[in-house]
Amino acid sequence: MNWNQIEGNWDQFRGKVQEKWGKLTDDELDVIAGKRKQLSGLIQERYGKAEDEAEKEIDLWLNHH
């Protein structure tokens, strides 16, 4: 699966995103609206991760969906 599919079907995937990154709020997920860069930024902020670490987590998650 590629990120365009996630972004295009954000309403279907937002629950799975919240399962993986539970510190993200519903409001934040609304604002993200499937934008990968914004998701990465929030993961960095909420979990204290570096950009490359957040991107790796997203890639791993993406490969499993």
Image (cartoon, rainbow, N blue to C red):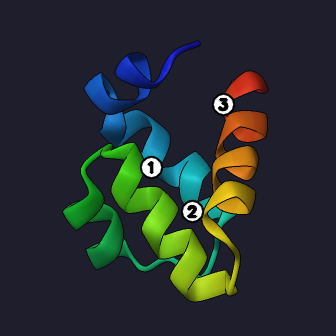
| Quadrant in which residue 47 is drawn | bottom right
Q: Is residue 32 left or right of residue 52?
A: left
Disc 2 element: helix
Q: Residues within 10 Å of mark 2 (few under 14, many from 20)?
A: some
Q: Are marks 1 and 2 in contact (CB under 8 Å)?
A: yes
Q: Give residue 46's position: percent from left, percent from top.
A: 57, 86
Q: Quadrant of the N terminus?
A: top right
Compute the Cα span from label 3 to label 1. 12 Å
Q: Give residue 54's position: percent from left, percent from top.
A: 66, 60
The residue to which callout 2 is attached is 18
Disc 3 element: helix
Taking 15 as reference, is 48 above or below it? below
Taking 32 as reference, is 42 above or below it? below
Q: Residues within 10 Å of mark 1 (few under 14, many from 20)?
A: some
| Quadrant in which residue 65 is drawn | top right
Disc 1 element: helix
Q: Looking at the picture, which amino acid does disc 3 mark?
A: Leu
The residue to which callout 1 is attached is 14
Q: Looking at the picture, which amino acid does disc 2 mark?
A: Gln
The residue to which callout 3 is attached is 62
Of tags 3 and 1, the one toward the viewer is 3
- 27 and 36: which is toward the camera: 36
Of tags 2 and 3, the one toward the viewer is 3
- 58 and 28: which is toward the camera: 58
Q: Looking at the picture, which amino acid does disc 1 mark?
A: Arg
Taking 6 as reference, is 57 above or below it? below
Q: Name the residue located 45 percent from the left edge and 68 percent from the top edge.
A: 41
